[in-house]
Amino acid sequence: MKVQRRNNRVEEKVKRGWEGQRERGKERERERERRERKERKNVLPILATTIAAVSTTMSPSPPPPPIIMAKMTTALSLLAIFFIITTSALNNEELVEQECPVDCHCHYFRVNWVTDCSDSNLTTIPYNELSHNVYVLDMNDNNIADISPFPESIKLRRLQMAHNQLTELTYESFAGLTYLLDADFSYNAITRVDPEAFRDSPGLITLELQHNPLDEVEEPFLNCRTLLYLDLNSCGIRHLNTRFFYNTTNLNKLDLSHNPLQKIEPGPFDHLTNLEYLKLNGCNLTYVSPEAFSHLENLRQLEIADNELKTLNWRSVLTPLVRLEHLDIRKTGITNLPGDAFAKNLYLLQLVLADNELWHLDVEDTLGHNLHSLQSLDLSNCNLQDRLSEEAFRNASKLRVLNLSGNPMFASDLTAVLRHLPKLHKLSLSNCSLRKLPDTFDVFEHLEELDISYNPLSDAFVSLLNPLSALEYLDMSYCGLGYVANNTFAQMTFLKQLILSGNELHTLEEGLFANLTRLESLELNNCDLKAPLDPKVFGDRQLTDIIELKLSGNPLMVPDEGSLLPTQLSKLEILDLSNCSILHLNKNMFATSNNLTQLNLSGNTISGVENLSFLKTLPRLEHIDLSNNNLRTINPKIFKANPRILSINLMGNPFICNCSIAETWDWAVQEKGDLHVLVGSQLANFETGSVKRRKNLSCAYDEETYRNMIDGNQSTANRKHYPSQFTPSRTWAKYVRESNCNRRS
């Protein structure tokens, strides 16, 4: 799991009910942290050795190139910070309960104290209630318009303020945040960022400001030379002055996508000699100066997709990028490319030309000039009008991945063209209007993945697939097949994943999968199957190695009693029965599939806890998805026979706010020791660029209870809230805090 979370704090009125829980929970946490401290002690000597080694590499003459020197300096700084943080953690013999604001939810993540105040309708940060040892403070999705100075000596490492009402970032707001490493202010109304805002944060390495209406900047945008990752996606930036990045020279990753820049002049990127990843997608670009990237010789990845660059001189623009490995110029309006467009990009490994109107592209000419290292080429949806010449890929001897999907193709042309690619590992021919397949698969000794989905194929192609004895992945979905002969896969003994979804098969032929002895994953979504697999499709085999089966979207008629699946699938671990119109599940439904670890029943019409009695037969179950059904209540006792359960998705059900929710919450905290078992109860992760708003487990008060609450004028006098809190809907977390249920102690 990406994040493990604990609930060790609630409002004062239920505090006594949690004291016993915290004692037991802390004991489990102490044991876990003792093991982690032991592991961390083993890390310290390694860190010391690494620092010494890096220092040594900086000594010899001649000195390393500037980018290497910069990376070494950055590495030393980050190692030193990590050393200090780790040492500080190790000095604490016990993990003690920290301060937690009443409206927030706090827990330890490993040895770090996390305070989650997200989605709480707050208009201010509860400064006076924060622990000075808070590691992560999550204030996402509130109504905060201003940030006041934080308490002195606070040791905050990550601050999350996405989806609030901030209008500016000032130095006064962040003065003294010496330990700050990551900050997220995305999706606010920020128009101005004080260049000195993070002057007191010498270790800041990531800053997210995407989706803010920033004013035009005339001077350096920010004074922060330690910054490695800066996200300015969708900030309304129309112009970059030549000194914009003057004081952020160590940037490694920069995202400027979806700003109306229109053109890139020389100068703005000249100071970013350490930059390796640059995104300029969707910037309304019509012009890029040949000198725009002249100082980005260390750039490895450039994304400049979704712009209007039809007349751009690609050779001039790309010539300085001598270390470029990945180039994405999809949907840029280009209709052709000269043969020398990539003449200086000798190390280019991945090239994406998708979604351009390349009617008359001379593939042989474009690839024949120095792209000898190219391993992946995406020409999907390029409306290639000219028939590919037989020599199109003659010079692409190292090509391993080729995507031609979305182009109208003739099987006869492909037969000649693909013969020059015997080392191909992955081929995509999806949606190419093919009525039959090319007769060229005999040359693909190494082909492992083939996608021929969304083509109006018929059973005539069967013999053409026979040579693909090394194939491991085959996608034949949505090919209009109403019948698949039982010898179709006879030679594919190495096949591990087969996708037949979207074909109205109704039934499957006897012996169809008999020779697929290594098959591990089978997808039959939306195949109009009324019944699941008949044992006869596996021939005489008594057991298969299939561990994943997807039957989503089929109008299955499940039995009133007995097992749903044949005994040949007893090794099954992952089963998808979502959107199958299932109303009732008998207690022995999965009796022959008791090795299941993941079960998806979302999007059905299951309405009562009695329909979950089948859980008693699944002792190895780890993940179950019951989202978007008609459950109105839940009882944690139904999971008594599932000791390995790690996640339960109950979101999207019309739950009534009652004590069964509080009981399930307590079960997750006390018996499972991990509230994250309940999907939607906790934030998902702390990753940059991740979704800021998340779906939560919710319930609604019945009409009578809600009316009594309004009449009683229940409110929280010590907090500034918006009126939206006075609605019948509650997140589970909020309901548990305000409930008067008899809680476990």
Image (spheres, rainbow, N blue to C red):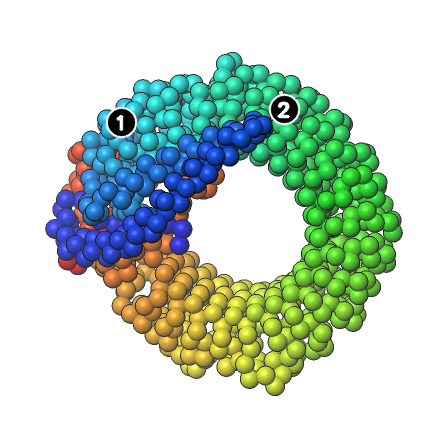
User: Which quadrant would the C terminus be assigned to in this image?
Assistant: bottom left
- Name, please, the residue furthest toward the right: 390
Identify the residue at horizontal 63%, vertical 83% (top origin): 539
In the image, 351 versus 116, the foreground residue is 351
| Dot in front, 1 or 2 | 2
Q: Quadrant of residue 150?
A: top left
Image location of residue 329, percent across then percent down: 68, 37
Task: Tell which of 297 and 124 is nearer to you.
Answer: 297
Q: Amino acid at mark 2?
A: His
Left or right, 201 with respect to 371, comes to left
* Few, some or many residues within 10 Å of mark 1 (<14, 14–19, 20+): many
Q: Which residue matches tag 1?
A: 150
| Whole-number angstrom distance, CA of label 1 to CA of label 2 | 39 Å
- Residue underneath mark 2: 295
- Image check: 597 left or right of 471? left
Q: Quadrant of residue 474?
A: bottom right
Answer above or below: position of 7 versus 197: below
